[in-house]
Amino acid sequence: VYFGGGTPTYPDSGWIQKIMNLLKESFDCSFCEESTLEANPGTVTPESLKKYKEAGFNRLSIGLQSANDRELEKAGRIHRYRDFLESYKYARNAGFTNINVDLIFGFPWQSYQDWKNSVDTLVSLNPEHISCYDLILEEGTPLFNQIQKGEYVMISDSLNREMYYYVCDTLKKNGYRQYEISNFAKPGFESKHNTVYWKTLDYIGFGAGAYSFVNGIRYGNTDDIEEYIGRIKKDGNAVIQREALSFEDRMNEYAMLGFRMTDGIDMEEFFSKFGVRFSEYYNEKILMLTKEGFIEIQDKKVRLSRKGLDFANLVFMEFI
């Protein structure tokens, strides 16, 4: 179970409890090992965290983004590092033993030292899971507009890679395993929710803007809340997008997402799932990507090389 998108900890915790109880009434959740709640720093209290624990949440994901207050202010975040630290301590005191923290690198105003300090500061707190995302510019956002106007300049590719190498090497030294391009975990704390996506398994999404993937068909709900409520009342669902993936599309998506994981693609698992041999079906792509040094094959698994991690998007494009 995963509550995300926006800030689920913003409304009264009683609402989240009610939704969780409804899920338990509607589905057999007895097998559920991981129930995650996303939280922004400063939006949780000792009381609300106690209610979340009582509701059945056993994992918290906190969007820190940076341990540098100047960076947070420039990025338009309303929290400061002290707010995160308070929320983190509250979560520990409430009994959360599985906490993820998000960081972002690549801000135009970010120096190597800024990033190093954020990583080092977070490592000292020893969360079970750390997600480090490369900044993606979304069209229409304030930062996108500022860069378009020339108010900021994006950092160089070489500095971006130095930042990425630093977090990879530092987290490895501190007992974290990089199991996906942007995700690092202590052994046994890899996100089960995220792995469902990367393995292209089925999932059901509820709420405005939520997506589902069932039996090879992707469904998308309207992201307009009033329209969502109206459609639910009238039709019982708010689906406005349906996409039935072809057999080839499903294989390509499985391959593309599989390359995101550091274990790569298990070729025997691929054959078991699709009845097609990965090495034969993608023979030309494999030869080309191997020649470029982007992928490597070992123990019947094909994965990105260290060089391939830097050019991952080029690899992904081969399977779109």
Image (cartoon, rainbow, N blue to C red):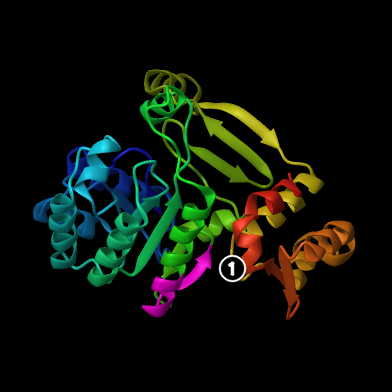
Q: Quadrant of residue 273?
A: bottom right
Name the residue: 44% across, 57% down: 28
Question: From which residue to which does the magenta span run?
Answer: 169-180
Query: Is 297 inside the magenta-drawn segment?
Result: no
Question: Camera-side residue: 301 or 202?
Answer: 301
Question: Camera-side residue: 304 or 252?
Answer: 304
Name the residue: 73% across, 71% down: 296
Q: Residues within 10 Å of mark 1 (few under 14, many from 20)?
A: some
Question: Camera-side residue: 220 or 310?
Answer: 310
- State the image coordinates of residue 198 (x, y, percent, origin top left): 59, 57
- State the image coordinates of residue 91 (x, y, percent, origin top left): 18, 61
Residue 52 vs 34, above or below: the answer is above
Q: Quadrant of residue 169?
A: bottom left
| 293 sits to left or right of 82 | right
Q: Is residue 59 visible?
A: no
Name the residue: 38% across, 30% down: 143
Disc 1 residue type (three-letter): Thr
- Residue placed under numbered mark 1 in the picture: 262
* SS at badge 1: loop
Query: Is 175 inside the magenta-drawn segment?
Result: yes
| 49 sits to left or right of 190 | left
